[in-house]
Amino acid sequence: MTGLTIVQITDTHLRPEGELLHGVDTAANLTAVLERLREFGQRIDVLIFSGDLSDNGSPAAYRRLRAAVEPVAADLGAEIVYAMGNHDERTAFGIELLGRDTVDPDLPHDHSVQVAGVRIIVLDSTTPFQHDGKLEPQQLAWLAGELRTAAPHGTVLVVHHPPLRSPLATLDFLRLKDAEQLAQVVAGTDVRMILCGHNHLTGASALAGIPVWIGPAMAYRVDAMAPAGRHRGFAGFGYSRIDVMESTVLATAIDAAPAPKVYDRPESEMLEQIAAITAARATVR
């Protein structure tokens, strides 16, 4: 295996054209990140959108998302994986993003895809009209069935709501409930990382010994250390690079908010400088 590079984009909270979210142009944030991906110039295998893709379930917002994302994915040769979030609406999501003719709003959008030997399983942790997360018994049974057969290079599980407690009261209230049931299903399987969104902050923990990554949101950031009794958000956005390698999985948070450069040099020049420093130290010893 030569490695698989995933870009996780979460909580885009797109609205129809001309509408802002808390004064934020979320479409402009998405466009800026997609342009950065185009400029990357290296292989990106999968684009995972891990929920709250629309802010209010608007079909127009989903069409806006596809119009922005699909040309970039085609240029990159990247697979697109969409997951539901609590702000999404199952019928519009299924029709506009998953290409389904009809949708039963009582059935979750769970699915599995394999890319270069890595299996990506998406679980729909939403309950219509609720903002906390829950997985139904039939979903856990389906997941267990999928995981009975290991994928060639392991599995990445995508679920919008983090299956974790949080020190922030609001986020703890809105987490994935009964996470211990998910833990029982994934323990001892080939799941190598669990990717989440929802919290509008970047975080990492583990469930059943499996790394859990909460990706930075594309819309705005929640203050993880707000003054006592306050819940507040700040402008700012980012995305995640997930590298699935032979022996490990590495998650990297990437800040996409505009910022001045402190340097921008050829990589070869930097490598030469590092090699020279290393050689000099070896000579001193």
Image (cartoon, rainbow, N blue to C red):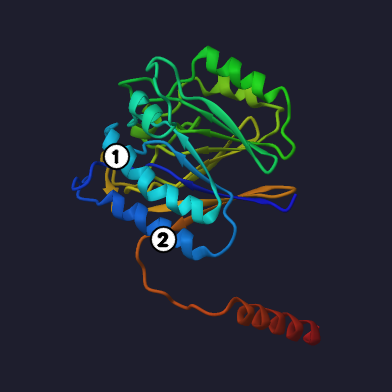
The x and y percentages for residue 59 are 29, 33
Q: Earlier in the sequence, mark 2 or mark 1?
A: 2
The three-letter code of the residue at mark 1 reads: Ala
The x and y percentages for residue 88 are 34, 31
Q: Looking at the picture, does residue 58 appear above or below residue 182? A: below
Q: In this image, 230 relative to 127: left or right?
A: left
The x and y percentages for residue 217 are 39, 46
Q: Which residue is mark 2?
A: 35
Residue name at image x 44 percent, y 39 percent = 197
Q: In this image, 88 relative to 146: left or right?
A: left
Helix, strand or loop at mark 2? helix
Q: Are marks 2 and 1 in contact (CB under 8 Å)?
A: no
Hey, which quadrant is residue 187 in on the image? top right
Helix, strand or loop at mark 1? helix
Residue name at image x 53 percent, y 12 percent = 137
Residue name at image x 39 percent, y 14 percent = 106
Q: Which residue is mark 1?
A: 61
